[in-house]
Image (cartoon, rainbow, N blue to C red):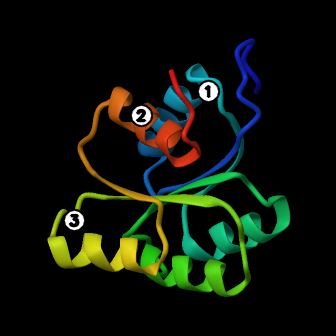
């Protein structure tokens, strides 16, 4: 779904919670992003990321089958060019640092506001409001 004010950026949302995927999708679509895929587990996320080549991936760190940091490593090894925003309820500095050191653009800790998500997504592309 593209809004009238689309910024042309395509997003893959990865979170095992249907509610969180819905919330992230609603927020990003309203902000002009096009959600081109959703995944609730790591295996699906990897397959979609390689198949649809999104511009942005929101990536939950704790999924049923693997950690987001493991997905991040694999995607970067496959030379996926997407900006990646790690999202997790785990706010420990070591976990955040690992995600950022592996190549995530940003790391958001749950719970977060819609404004934080939009600002972070825009910052990943250096888009001004």
* Residue 29 badge: 1
Query: Where in the figure is residue 8, as x and y percent of width and height?
Result: 77, 33
Which tag, 3 or 1, sits closer to the chain's start?
1
Instruction: Using the image, determine if residue 29 lies above or below residue 125.
Output: above
Residue at 26% over, 49% down: 110
Residue bearing mark 2: 119
User: Which residue is situated farthest in the left direction here?
Assistant: 92
Left or right of 36 in this view: 117: left
Query: Where in the figure is residue 13, as x and y percent of width and height?
Result: 58, 51
Residue at 71% over, 66% down: 81
Residue 88 vs residue 125, the one in the foreground: 125
Instruction: Using the image, determine if residue 18 lies above or below residue 28.
Output: below
Q: What distance separates the C-alpha of mark 2 from that of mark 1? A: 13 Å
On the question of residue 11 being in view, the answer is: yes
- Name the mark nearer the viewer: 2 or 3: 2
- Name the mark nearer the viewer: 2 or 1: 2
Residue bearing mark 3: 90
* Residue 111 badge: none
Q: Secondary structure at mark 3?
A: loop
Q: Are marks 2 and 1 in contact (CB under 8 Å)?
A: no
Query: Where in the figure is residue 94, as x and y percent of width and height?
Result: 20, 79
Q: Badge 3: few (under 14), some or many (20 or more) residues near its Cα, within 10 Å? A: some
Q: Badge 2: few (under 14), some or many (20 or more) residues near its Cα, within 10 Å? A: some
Q: Quadrant of residue 35?
A: top right
Q: What distance separates the C-alpha of mark 2 from that of mark 3? A: 20 Å
Left or right of 121 in this view: 36: right
């Amino acid at each position: 779904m593209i809004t009238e004010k689309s910024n042309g950026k395509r997003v893959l949302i990865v979170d095992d919670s249907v509610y969180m995927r819905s919330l992230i999708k609603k927020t990003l679509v309203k902000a002009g992003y096009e959600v081109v895929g959703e995944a609730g587990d790591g295996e699906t996320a990897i397959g979609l990321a390689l198949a649809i080549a999104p511009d942005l991936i929101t990536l939950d760190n704790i999924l049923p089958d693997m950690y987001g940091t493991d997905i991040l490593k694999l995607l970067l090894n496959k030379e996926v060019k997407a900006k990646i925003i790690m999202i997790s309820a785990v706010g420990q500095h070591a976990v955040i640092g690992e995600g950022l050191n592996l190549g995530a653009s940003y790391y958001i800790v749950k719970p977060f506001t819609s404004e934080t998500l939009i600002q972070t997504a825009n910052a990943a592309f250096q888009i001004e409001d």
